[in-house]
Image (tube, rainbow, N blue to C red):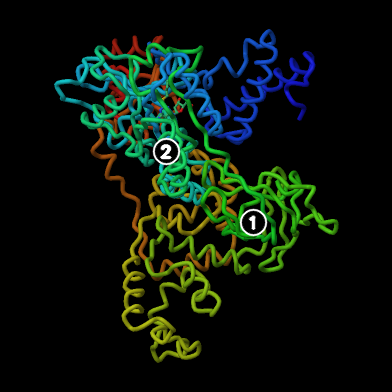
Amino acid sequence: MKDAKLLTKQEAALELEFIAREMAKSDVAYYQNDDPYLTDAEYDALKLRNEQIEKRFPDLVREDSPSKKIGAPVQSDFKKVEHKVPMLSLADIFSVDQLKEFIASIRRFLNIDAPIDFTAEPKMDGLSFSVRYENGHLVKAATRGDGKTGEDITENIKTIKGLPHFVEAADFPKIIELRGEVYMSKADFYALNQKNAQENKKTFANPRNAAAGSLRQLDANITKERNLSLLVYTWGEVSEILWDSQTRFLEKVKQWGFPVNPYNKICHNQDEIIKSYETLCSARADLAYDIDGIVYKVDRLDLQQRLGFLTRTPRWAVAHKFPAEKAITKINNIRIQVGRTGALTPVADLEPINVGGVMVSHATLHNEDEIKRKDIRIGDYVVVQRAGDVIPQVLSVVEEKRAKEAEEFVFPSVCPECGAHAIREQDEAVRRCTGGLSCPAQAIERLKHFVSREAFNIEGLGAKIIEDFYGEGIIKRPDDIFTLESRNGGDDLFSNACGLHLENRAGWGGKSVQNLFASINDKRKITLARFIYALGIRQVGSATALLIAKNYGSFDAFAEKMKAGDVEKLLGIDGIGEAMTADIVAFFKEAHNLEVVENLRKYVQIEDYVDNTKTDSPLWGKTVVFTGTLSSLTRAEAKAKALSMGAKVAGSVSAHTDFVVMGQDAGSKAKKAGELGVKILSEEEFLSFI
Ligand code: IVH
């Protein structure tokens, strides 16, 4: 790239246009869709380049320049909230030299020679929020949005543990907006992604996106299911300020019962500030959550006031970003992993390398197109990065270091585990093994799935044991699990034939064998939803399994229809589409699957679906009609909610209607309800029901 100093004016204009476009695209992907398009490092590099060019050609600064914007405008699905005090951003710095210059510039501005106190606070990599209290009560919460207008996330934020809904303290201001960051711990992020992957749902690139995606849910129940955390670090509108420094503010907030970061520090001079950076930089990898830098703030409020603000950032604070966690290492091998549904996933085995404090020895290469796009070859040196601190990714190949003999990687067209053809269906990025259960990898992964937490949840059958048992022919298929005890040690021919004496295995004893049998026997009764999920039908995650259970009630009812290819009811279920239906029918066409299912039915009792929640609901058995536009949820969502609570939803009002839910601009149905004396519910009343 040409040095910014050497650009002609025309080149500069073109580049500014390019950067504005790229960053706008990235902002939408990041802030609205919670799905980043540029890496943090790429984003920061563009931002810096933009700044350098604008500094040289101030008259070229565009209206839509990234330097004038914060975040992205909010989407329409959420109610909007105006921030009376704007939610600002921070200027970034990337080096200790810049940090020294920042401190010096503040001294110059204030004309103070003596050292100035700064707070050093970990820069949480989450999503900022503002929560408003009136007379001690939490009344409203919002995201930052574009800094002026955010999204109403009141109900969502209330589900986060540790946030007081009411504060009684005598010194709690009558009106106060507390601001901070919502985040997800690394552990919760892993767990969520694992669960979503199992259910064929969207996985998140990093904890920050997972936090944003979890918080910005129209249905706050989803937010509640995700483990989110939050910390407070500043304030917005406030009726009276009872503190004279950031440190005292943080103390107060803590006394009022809000979580604040225990790593916040006060630094009295430049050396302490630099020390705080070094300490946090090395502690970073061990923290339970992601941070992407340190925020330094002038501690005294009177000095903050004198320093004031630039257009979108305060002059009294700065964000010192950590260097991107990248490293260069060699790809020793490219392996193909075969998953439960036969998907072939390429994985790079790397020469182990320390990336920002964590040893990385492999990285996913996603799929065959990704390898082609980046032209990744065995033996190549590549730039690896831990995205959002966690999943190692291969960013690019260092072409200068490529060996002459390095050959293009040829993605196999047969399964490396069983030799069956591996094919790619149209519009699919994934190549799949067609070997089905005769492929050991698929069979083993299916067994692992069968015993997993949300399926049969059998303790004592970990991955290693499943692999060993499969290899030795002890457990080949799910139904074998339930005959294990009867085959062990007894005198029948079968057990003698395979010499099954589990208690004699190395590292095992009578006790561990008894424990294993006990945990298997404990699962001889299972709910319908778990059973369907355990079958491992492609695309059928636990949420889909529950939908099927709800709609069919019993396994017989479901299996009969599937065997007959009768999918009418299945297709009518909101959330089940044609592709999934095709996979379900295909499962029931396969003789092997039917045999396993039939055997399992001999050993386990599948409980019919019972819905305990429905019968207690105020909508149970009632007929509901919707009219007009609802403001907080779509008609389809409202209908689904009502159905899930046991209501019948009708299209027109009659004497049989129990409730009419009236949104805005309701027409003739509301009138008719009035005439017939049918109870009309406002949107709020309906929401309180559900
Ligand atoms: S103070 C006017 N303190 O970083 C200053 N921000 O790049 C407002 N952030 O929008 C922000 N940790 O989302 C502040 N301890 C901290 C922070 C922090 C993370 C985020 C916040 C802000 C962004 C600016």
Q: Residue furthest front?
A: 113
Of the two numbered discs 2 and 1 in the rendering, the one whose residue sits closer to the viewer:
2
Q: Which residue lies furthest to the left in this view?
A: 170
Q: Which of 290 and 202 is in front in this view?
A: 290
Q: Which residue position is annotated with label 2? A: 276
Q: Earlier in the sequence, mark 2 or mark 1?
A: 2
Q: In percent of the image, x 35 and y 24: which residue is there?
A: 299
Q: Position of residue 370 (x, y in %)?
A: 70, 46
Q: In this view, does 33 lie above or below 466?
A: above
Quadrant for ligand 1 reads top left
Q: In percent of the image, x 74 and y 26: which residue is there?
A: 3
Q: Where is residue 102 in the image (x, y as percent from the top left)?
A: 50, 24
Disc 2 marks a residue whose amino acid type is Ser
* Residue 490 relative to residue 568: left or right: left
Q: Is residue 279 above or below residue 331?
A: above
Res. 569 in view: yes
Q: Where is residue 373 in the image (x, y as percent from the top left)?
A: 75, 44
- Label 1: state its secondary structure: strand
Mark linked to residue 567: none
Mark linked to residue 347: 1
Distance from mark 2 CB to nearest ligand 1 atom below 8 Å: no
Q: Where is residue 514 in the image (x, y as percent from the top left)?
A: 32, 78
Query: How far apart are the alpha carbons under marks 2 and 1?
Result: 38 Å
Q: In which quarter of the image is residue 602?
A: bottom left
Distance from mark 1 CB to nearest ligand 1 atom below 8 Å: no
Task: Please identify the quadrant where the C terminus is shown.
Answer: top left
Disc 1 marks a residue whose amino acid type is Val
